[in-house]
Image (cartoon, rainbow, N blue to C red):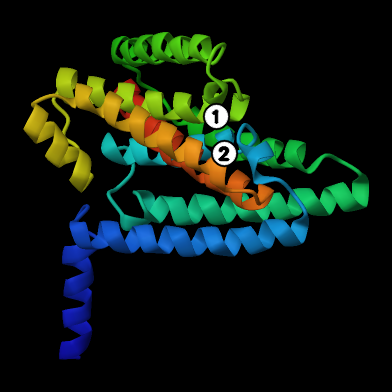
Amino acid sequence: MDLYFKVIEFLKIYFFSGYTLLNTIIYGIMLVLIIFGLIKLFKKLGKDPTELIFYVIPFIFIGSCIRAFVDNGILPYNWFLITPGIYFIVGSTTILSLLLGIYFEKKRNINYKKVLFLIGIILLIPIFVGINRINIISSLEIIAIWTVLTILFFLIGKFFYLYKDKYNLAIISAHILDGSSTFVAVDLYGYSEQHVIPNLIYKETLTAVSIFPLKIIVISLSLYVIEKYVDDDVIKGLLKLAIFILGLAPGLRNLLTLFLY
């Protein structure tokens, strides 16, 4: 029994009490393993994961809404309702919905992406019904910054191939939303960063504005490497999908958290 309680205490300290360097590394390893599993799945299904980028947005909204509800005390603080727990739950639901979409495509000749999107919308509706208070000012601040910077990269895409691709533009835009929401939340509304590395950078620079060059450089280099060195379409698409989700999910979470503030 002593060992049992020690294990529980270890998990509480290092996994259920916010982000630490240890659990950040472990979650990263788990993400890599999940991606490898999904690569095998998509190859077996014969589908391109890149095409799902816009169709999984309702599911990302679901996870982000639930996390925002927790941040604002509407739902209790629980590992399964915060990251990374909510990622596992919503991710599993998305994969099951994808498989259901594949089934309907084979049996009813209905586009699997439309089925996936529709399921996401149906699951999202009752969550949005639960919203009964809003802070429109903070939301408009985030959306304004995100819109201006997204338009800027859209214009850059006229001359630079990396942002000309609609999926690459969507990915950089998702991370711009994350950066915009982080900047507004931390610098203007006194929120704190939970992730270890960005928090260290903010402390050194004394502002969350530093998130913009950090994200733009890292994401742009990642997209460049993927485009140049990854030839497998499934691996390339899944990497892009993962990067998109890792940008849009926290971005929407921050936006909705302030929206409900």
Query: Which-is-in-front pick, marks 1 and 2?
Result: 2
Question: Which residue lies at the image location 82% right of the left edge and 54% below the top edge?
Answer: 103
Question: Which residue lies at the image location 53% right of the left edge and 58% below the top edge?
Answer: 35
Q: Label for residue 168?
A: 1
How many neighbours does mark 2 have within 10 angstroms: few (below 14), some (14-19), or many (20 or more)? some
Which residue extends farthest right? 108
- Does 161 appear above or below 156? below
Q: Label for residue 227?
A: 2
Which numbered disc, 1 or 2, marks the residue that appears first in the sequence?
A: 1
- Does 17 appear above or below 148? below
Question: Which residue lies at the image location 62% right of the left edge and 54% below the top edge?
Answer: 95
Q: Label for residue 68?
A: none
How many neighbours does mark 1 have within 10 angstroms: few (below 14), some (14-19), or many (20 or more)? many
Question: Which residue lies at the image location 27% right of the left edge and 37% below the top edge?
Answer: 71
Q: Quadrant of the N terminus?
A: bottom left
User: Is residue 84 shown left or right of residue 96?
Assistant: left
Residue 213 x %, y % = 28, 25
User: Is residue 143 shown left or right of residue 57?
Assistant: left
Total labels drawn: 2
Q: Is there CB contact under 8 Å for labels 1 and 2?
A: yes
Residue 89 x %, y % = 49, 55
The amino acid type of the residue labelled 2 equals Glu
In the image, 65 versus 191, the foreground residue is 191
In the image, 53 versus 56, the foreground residue is 53
- Does 119 appear above or below 44? above
